[in-house]
Amino acid sequence: MSGRLVEMGNKLLVDVYLSLIKARKTGFSIGDGYRINGLPIIRMGETSICQIGTNLRMNNSTKYNMVGIYKRCSIAVENGASLKIGNDCGFSGVSIYCGISITIGNNLTCGGNVSIWDTDFHPLSYLERRRYSSDAIRKKPILIGNDVFIGANSIILKGVTIGDRAIIAAGSVVTKSIPPDEIWGGNPAILLRKIQ
C-alpha cells in the first residue's frame, strides 16, 4: 500500500474516532486543521469538558516520531473536570490526566512521553489508600502559558503554573510554579537560567 493511501486511511480512522467522541460527549470539541498520526486514547466523564483548539499535532507511535515514544497519547478528563488546550499545540506519546482543571495556552510543544497530571491519583495516607477514599485524593489546577516547551519524559504535577515561553529540560519533574522566560530542569526541577 502506498504511503499516500496509508495517510488517507489514518485520517479517515481518526476522523471517525473523533466524530464518535463528539456524538457521545457534548463537552468535547476540537478545532480544524488537526494532524493526528495513529489513534490516541480519549476518556471523558459525562460532565467533563475537553476543548482542543486548532492545528493540533499528535503522534501516537514511534512510527511518526523517532524520539522513542512508549505509548499512544492519552487524555483522561474526570467527571466535572475541565481540560482546555489552545491552538497550534504538539504532543508525542503524551499523557494528560485532568481531575479538576488543566489549561494549556497556544503553541505548547511537548517532547516524547511527557505527563501532565493535576491529581495524586491516590490518597497519600496509607489508611486512606487501604480503603481507597477518593475524597482524600489531592487535586490542584495546572496552568501552562503560551509558547512553552516541555522536554521529553518530563512530568508536570498538580498545582503548577508554567509562565509564557518557559522551557522545561528533558526528564524534569515539575513540582512548583515556573515564571515566564526561564529554563528549569532536574528532579525536582530548579531554575537553570533565565532566557535572554
Image (cartoon, rainbow, N blue to C red):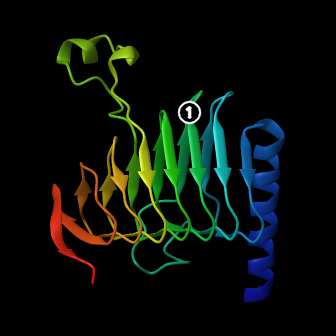
Left or right: where does residue 9 sit relative to residue 34? right
- Pinpoint residue 37: horizontal percent, then vertical percent: 64, 71
Q: Quadrant of residue 55?
A: bottom right
- Pinpoint residue 169: horizontal percent, then vertical percent: 26, 71
Judge by depth and name the residue closer to the eye, 80 or 162: 162
Left or right: where does residue 154 sit relative to residue 37? left
Which residue is found at the position 27% from the left and 79% from the top?
A: 195
Which residue is found at the position 39% from the left and 45% from the top?
A: 117
Residue picked out by circle 1: 81
Which residue is found at the position 34% from the left and 66% from the top?
A: 180
- Pinpoint residue 112: horizontal percent, then vertical percent: 41, 69
Residue 169 can be seen in this image: no
Judge by depth and name the residue closer to the eye, 95 or 107: 107
Q: Amino acid at mark 1?
A: Ala
* 125 over 88 or under it: above or below: above
Q: Quadrant of the C terminus?
A: bottom left
Q: Quadrant of residue 9?
A: bottom right
Residue 167 can be seen in this image: yes
Which type of secondary structure does the marked residue at label 1 adopt?
loop
Left or right: where does residue 188 sit relative to residue 155? left
